[in-house]
Every structure is written in C-alpha cells, then in structure tokens.
Amino acid sequence: MSRFGIVHAAVAALFLPAPAAAELIADGRFEKGRDAFWASDGLTLERESGRLCVETRGGGEVWSQIIGVNGLKLMPGHLYRLSAKVTAQPARAIPARVQRAADPWTAVAEFAMAGSPGGTPFSIEFEASEANEAQFVLPLGGGEAGRLCLDDISLVATGAVSSMAKRAIEEPAIRVNQLGYFTGGPKRATFVAAAKRPIDFQLHDAKDTVVGKGRTQPSGFDPMAGVETQVADFSSFATAGNGYRLVAGDWASDRFSIGDDLYDRLRVDALSWFYPQRSGIEIKAAIAGKAYARSAGHIGVAPNQGDKAVACLDGKQAEALYSGWSCSYRLDVSGGWYDAGDHGKYAMTGALSAAQLLATYERGRVYATGSPVTRDGLSHIPEDGNGMPDILDEARWELEFLLRMMVPDGEPLAGMVHHKVHDIAWTAVPMLPSDDPQPRALYRPSTAATLDVAAVAAQGARLFADQDPTFSERLLAAARKAWVAANANPALFAPTSDGLAGGGDYDDDSISDELFWAATELYLTTGDEAYLDVVRASLLWAADTLSPGGAFDWRNVAGFARLQLALYGTGLPDGDRDAIRNSVLSAARHFLSLQKTEPFGVVYRPEDRRYDWGSNQLMLQNIIVLSAAFDLSGEKTFLDGAREGMDYILGRNALALSYITGYGTRAAKNQHSRWYAQQRDPQLPNPPVGSLAGGPNSTLVDDVARQHLKGCAPQTCYADDIEAYGSNEIAINWNAPLVYVASFLADAR
C-alpha cells in the first residue's frame, strides 16, 4: 500500500457552497467612523447621526459628481444582496452601479434607488459576473441641487449561487481525468470545496480496497471556474489497473485507470473521425459503423447542387463582398472534409488540419521510431491495406481537394486558391450532406488561403516523397505556383461580412504569419535558401509567437511554423537552429510555470482571462508546444506537463465533463452537427467516438448560450446542446491537434 498521509472521515460538508459571507461594506451604519466611502472633487461627505450625507450641485454631466466605496471582493456566479435606506431632498431616483473598480469599469449590476425626504428602504439582489475587484458608485450629477443621505447600507453574499455557478459544484466534488493517468506520470485531481484547511482522501481500487491515502493542498478561488479549489496529488502511486477512484468522506470521484496504453485507442478514434467527415464519398457501414453509413454528399446528385462544377459567387452578394470580382469558370471541388457541423469547406482550416495530420506522421517518423502512426492499418478508412500509412491517406483526401481549389492557368489570379466553397444560404439542423438542396458557390481567392495551401502542399511533398513520388511532385509544383501567385497578390483579403450567408467568414487581414509558414515549409522541403531568407527577414523570426493564450490556430500559424523549424530544421545554420529551438523551450517552460498555478492543471492562459472560441483546441496546441520541447530536449518535465494538460480535456474541469465523445463517465455527445444530430432526430447518430467539442466560450454567440450561460465563469461557458455551436461544435481543426496529442502521448512512454 502506498501512503500519502492520514485520512479522516466526515468531510462531506466541506463541499457545500460557501455560507453567507461577511459584510462587504465596512461600517455601513456610519456609527464607528470606519467606513471607506469617497467623493469626487467638489463634493464633501458628512457623517452625522449614523448617516452618510452629501450636498449635490445642480446640472452638469451625470458622472461629474460621484460618491462610492471600493474594495468589494465578489465571486463570479454567486448572488449578493445590496440594501440601504435612502433619504433625498427633494425626492429623486438615484442611479447606482456595482462595477469593476478599474477601466473599463464593466457593470456588474445597474439599478436606481428611490430616495425620499422621509427615507425609503431599498434592496436588490444581483449575480456577480467576474472576479475583479469591484466598487459601488452613485453618479449624482445632471439633476437639480439637493441633499442625499445613506443609512444602513449593506452588501452581503446570500449564500446562494446562480444556476451557472451551480453547474460547477453540483457535479462530483472530486474532478479527475476520467480516462486515467500514466503509471510514471503526474496524478492530480481537483477538489471543488469551500474548506480552507486540507482535506484527507483515500485512493480506492476497483474493489474499493484502500490502496493509498493523502491530503489535499488548498489552492484558493479559481476565477476561471468560479469555485474554491484544492488539489490532490497521488503521483507516487504507480500500480497499473482499472476502476480506481478517489474518496473523501461521502464524496467519490469518477472511476479512472492507471496505465501506459491509455491513449492508444484515442489515437485511432480521433483519426478515424475524419472518414465520416469526408465529402464526396459514400460512408460505408462496414468501416464507420452502421449508424454512420450515408450516401456521398455534394457529388452533383439531386438534391445537391455541387461540388462537381461550382461557379463563383455572383450577383448582389458578390458585388457587396468583393466589389467587381467575378469569374467565368466552374471548378470540380468535390472531396475534402466538411469543416465542422455544416457543409462548408474552407481552405485555411483545411490546410492547417491536414498539416497537423502530416506533422503527426512526421513526428512519429523522426521522434518515435516504429510508431503505429507511420504504418498502414491504423484507422478505419477505405484505403486500409493499400500499403500507405493511414494518416497520409487521410491527409491526401484533403490535399487533393485543396489543389482543386486553385484558380486554373490562363485565368485572372491563376495559382491563387479560393478561400472557401459552401452553400449560399444556411441550412437547418438536421440535414445529411446528400440532402442539402442549396446552390454552392466559390468565394474569391485570398492571399492567406493561397499561402496556407503553399505551406501544406510543400509539407506534403516532403512526406509523400518516399511513398508516392508522383504525388509529391504534384504537391511541390502546386506549392511553388501558389507561392508565386500569393506574392503577386499580397493584399487579397477575405472580407468580414459574409458570415450570414451559408458559411463562416474565416477572415484574415494579416498574412505575415501565412507567409512565414509557407516559406518555412518550402525551405524545409527544398533546402532553397531563398525561402530561408524570407523566413529570416520576417518580423516573426525573432518574435514571441507562442502565446499561452493559444500557441497557434488557423488565423495565426506562425507558432506552428516555429515548431516545424525547431523540430525539422536540421539544415539551418547552427546559430539559427539553436535560436529557434531555444525559443520553443523558453515558451514551453513559461507554459509549465503557468500550469503550476492552475488548480485544474490547464495549459492555457488567455490574456483577458476569457475563454476563446475553440478553447479546447487552443489548449491542445499549447500541449503540442510542450511535446515539441520534450522531443527537442528529452526533459521529462515537458512530457509530464503535456500529460497533465490532458486532464482538463478528459474531465478534470469545472463541469466534470470529458469533452471527447465516448471517453469518460460523462462526456459530450450532442455536438453541433447537421448529420450527427440524434438530439433532433432519433434516427440519426450522435457524433462518433473520438469527437472533440470546441469547449467553453466566454463570448455567448448562440441562443442557447445567451439564454442559459449569462454570467458564466469562463470554464462553465459551455452547453452540451446541438444548437450551442459557439461552445459545442465539432471541427476538423479541433480533431487534428487531438490526433497529434493522442499520438504523442501514446508513443512517449
């Protein structure tokens, strides 16, 4: 038996919501001379007979005369009651706000307090929406001159939490990685508990025999989750097995495993996810499973109106977006992957997604000799058994589509890549791809899309060279053509106003990162120093491109290029190679330093402390930075950081939810999709096992979020609902980094 400490029972009460808090406004009866109220210039506060009074001037702006009190510590998601007695001569309504105590002075609550000569009691309850220090202020300008007095002013927590905050405390109090932990890796869990003292816990095996004991470390209030936390560390326990759980009094975690083969199946499932996401091919039951079998989508068979001969967008919509652009040709742009839960196909997300599958293969080939990811037969695809590594087969499905998106020779903008192809109007949920009746349109080429395709085509040329030299040559020729075309058209940007017409914008008006990536891949493949000169000349060469708020994504690809240079730039001059590699190691060490302060072990720190659209994907990209640092250095701390970073994705989070379908006791299963839509049509399936949900999104963009998630702490801004596309969509650029991370963790033992 492994021993971590001493256990004691009866700790269930430690997990209850915090009781009513102490008074937050000191000396609100104004009897002890200890209040902290202040007044703006020109106003004088008087404390008389247990009241706070002020004479106001007439006229001026509302905010020209203010009284208030600072230092209010609020907890997001908790409910507060503000009460006072308001005396005003003459009678008037007094505007009041509880707001952030610093720019931009975000309002937590706004209301009017009725004041009368005889004094009027006032009381209101509100929910705190953020953890920043707040202030209570009364803007008194703009009206007629008069006198205002406050008495018996009080601000207290009611002891209750909002419905959103309850989501974080009503799940199991002990949050764990519901898949499991590596025998030789970190094993930590997060307790959601209001207690200030450490909590004793036990580790139970599948038969509920006590095999270990320990004591938590209080971690304080986590504003990202909106809860008080403690961390349990049982890393020293190293016996493989299934069905373990942590227990503290009447509370128990979900069951989990300890072992070294945890991510083998996830690697297969995450990669196999791409096959039923394919466009232009029948999805067969024998490969994908009976529930996922469907006819080919968008191959020109009615009611489809694409994608075998798609024209460019024209008419009023094209004129409004592009002012004069049109084309006379039609393109066969069949194939590729549907980008997300709709039927659109986008060059920028497609390029990065294919690139991350290719990068998974290249990492396996260079840093994990013998990895299954480098062999045929890994995933469930129709090409199984053709002698080609499955991951290259899958990436090729998208690469062929991206080549078809190129403007033909002899046409204006020849060699440029169309930004996207999708319906000209949105379709409803549910709808199988083959049932989509909407006309399809090609959207104007963009410089960003063209450079992205140049990059991934060059990368593919390098990796297909041994497997399929002919295809490799096609890819390299396309990469060079796209490079020339993009440099001849350096400012052809996608507009930001087309998101209401059947597809997403994917706008990007800065192409320095795409240029950096394209030049990087062309250099790595060809060794031509002309491309290296472009890389070196870029401001991104020496810039900090690996942010803890998300190392890279489709709009910001410089971080991905930096990793590629660090991992595979063996031909770089020694000084350049060392500088690039050291920049990756430095960023990874910074990520680890931040991770140590996170009660849920996340590798993610957005600058504005708000979770972004696709936050789960951003966490995965940060984990990939740690994986690269491990590959470059061999330092186990980076591997351990990557392992612990996956805890959040697999259930050690504010909602105690695994964001990967089919993995964990409770996992997302209603992700936004038109054809994995069982929530709307019982005849349709849920998303396949291995589907990653986008994750909490502090920007409430859909009706489900706006109705149910108002005031959510960042980690709780998520709903497992098919209409919650802002936090719960599937996407190729979500699952591609999941493949990379799962493959890395499966190999790096």
Image: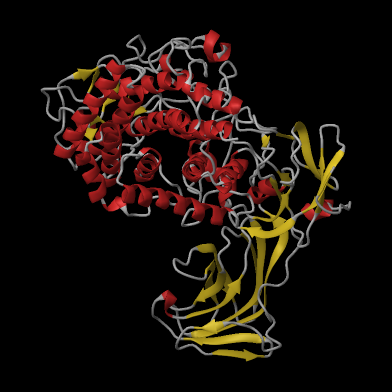
Residue 123 location (% of width, % of height): 66, 67
> Which residue corresponds to the image point at 35% horizontal and 20% vertical from the top-left?
466
**Quadrant location, the N terminus:** top right
Q: Can residue 108 be spotted in the picture?
A: yes
Residue located farthest toward the front when viewing the structure as drawn: 574
The reply, left or right, for residue 500 in relation to residue 693 is left
397 in relation to 671, above or below: above
Query: Of residues 401 and 47, which is closer to you in this image?
Result: 401
Nearest the viewer among 45 and 352 is 352
**Percent x, y for residue 299?**
34, 12
Residue 232 in the image: state x and y as whole percent: 73, 50
- Left or right placement of residue 120 versus residue 468 in this view: right
The picture quadrant where one finds residue 282 is top left
Residue occupying the point 33% across, 48% down: 574
Q: Is residue 417 above or below residue 653?
A: above
Side (left or right) of 77 relative to 594 = right
Residue drawn where x is 19% and y is 25% of the image:
407
Q: In front here: 476 or 690?
A: 476
Find residue 16 and report its horizontal and vertical position in percent: 78, 53
Asked which colour scheme the image uses, the reply is secondary structure
- Give the residue at x 76% y 41%: 253
Residue 687 visible in the shown view: no
